Image: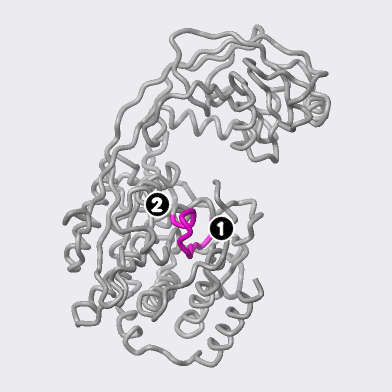
Amino acid sequence: MKRNYWIAGMLSMCLVWQANAQDATALKYAELITAQGLEEKLTYLASDELEGRDTGEKGQKMAAEYLSNFYKNQGLVGPVNGDYLQKFNLASVSFSDVNLTVGKQKLVNNEDFVFIGDGDMKKAAKADLVFLGLASEENLSKIDVKGKIVGLWAIGERAQTVVRDVMDAGAAGIVIVTMEGQANFDRLANRYKSLSGRGRLGFEQPSKQEPIFLVSSDKMSSLFDTPVEILKEAAKNNPESIKAQKASYLIKKSTKLVPTENVMGYLEGTDKKDEVLVISSHYDHTGIDSQGRINNGADDDGSGTVSVMQIAEAFAAAAKDGIKPRRSILFLNVTGEEKGLLGSEYYSNNPIFPLENTVNNINIDMVGRIDYEYQDAEDQDYVYVIGSEMLSSHLKVINEYNNITYTGLKLDYRYDAEDDPNRFYYRSDHYNFAKHNIPVIFFFNGVHDDYHQHTDTVDKIEFPLMTKRAKLIFHTSWDLANREERTPVDGTNTRGER
């Protein structure tokens, strides 16, 4: 640990000394990244014609064709046996019939509960509904959960972890509360209702008989005929005080395959060509909402995608002039990010180039706007930087050097904290590289009122600021692709599970 601090300190001293040591060649090609070029590309990518680029839908296919033609026209190589598309299938899972009855209450799907589990049953099953509250060892020693539907009070808990603990203890299923307030639950239920006709997208896998029903705190109170405040107290250390109920449930499932594709363009390096730098974005978005409005996704992540395109154009122009990078570069636009980082997960599990030869991932997700934190600031030239110092002591310093030398942005690390309640580190595609111990940087502008709304449109993009951010990413990428030694992996991955 002390050695890492010494390395970072020495590198920081070098930054100050070399702050004016600009690379004229890098500067020349960085000038090809322009606000006009970004706007022209984004105007098409985030147009109504592409219908919000929903994974597997027509607009996503049109975007994939647009990207692959662009890389071809730049003279980049299609690395998938000559193709620019890495094609694969996702599974769209629909639950046509999900029923839950507790006592005499017959609950309504996407109103009284949201089904977040899995299962496929021929007939309804019966079980006791018992209240466990917190999934602590003490509570599990007091309540027999085997073969039961278990009521969990998981507000402030990591839901995935407690669900797994209880299912592993032998539960037949779970009714879980994860949020306070009926209004918060109703918003979530309405979103699930609007999406229910599309099905859940994911990787095909065998059905698991894991009926998991998400309910509001008020509904849990109603199911056990016990006031919320009493349930809260019982959840901590005396769940046995809450009377069990009789329950029945039924789940019917259907699955269809949905073809989709990652898009990539490859620039082979020179003397270090076996080492690969990946510059990524996701090009999908959320499609058309329940009211028929197109979610254009100009910032999320049209901005990141056209930034990758402009950076690729700059590197390709240099290559045409005989100035190739020492390391190879893969420009990677992934699908299915909005469905759970699916495209990057597929690539990391089926890499075109060996992961051990992948030196870094530079991921760009939302770089075209100004967020809540900076909307009233005098100086709005900022970008959030996430994940840059977890796995390598050099990567953060290299990025800071290039920022000092070329762009002078404020690099904001507030979302780099491991206890960041927004969990942004886990919510974009760099995650699927970092989990394989590949040092990453995630560039991000933060959230705003138009995040995941039909109002995320091109006219709201701050193109001059976006250009400056893209130039920083280009200079950092140029540096990483051409330096003598690859960035060392001398840190520990402390954020393994999403």
Dot 1 falls on a residue whose secondary structure is loop
Residue ID at (63%, 18%): 149
Question: Could you tell me how many numbered marks the image carries?
Answer: 2
Locate residue 198: give its quadrant. Answer: top left
Q: Look at the picture and state if 434 lies above or below 318.
A: above
> What residue would you read off at disc 2?
297
Q: Which residues are magenta?
A: 433-447
Nearer to us: label 2 or label 1: 1
Position of the N terminus by quadrant: bottom right
Are discs 2 and 1 less than 8 Å apart at CB? no
Q: Nearer the viewer, residue 83 or 485?
A: 485
Q: Position of residue 251 (x, y in %)?
A: 48, 16
Q: Position of residue 295 (x, y in %)?
A: 39, 46
Q: CA distance from mark 2 to mark 1?
A: 31 Å
* Amino acid on which disc 2 is placed: Gly
> What residue would you read off at disc 1?
493
* Amino acid on which disc 1 is placed: Asn
CA neighbours of label 2 inside 10 A, class few (<14), some (14 to 19), many (20+): many
Dot 2 falls on a residue whose secondary structure is loop
Look at the image and say whether residue 468 sits in the magenta stretch.
Answer: no
For marks 2 and 1, the one nearer the N-term is: 2
CA neighbours of label 1 inside 10 A, class few (<14), some (14 to 19), many (20+): some
Does residue 3 appear to the left or right of 283 in the view shown? right
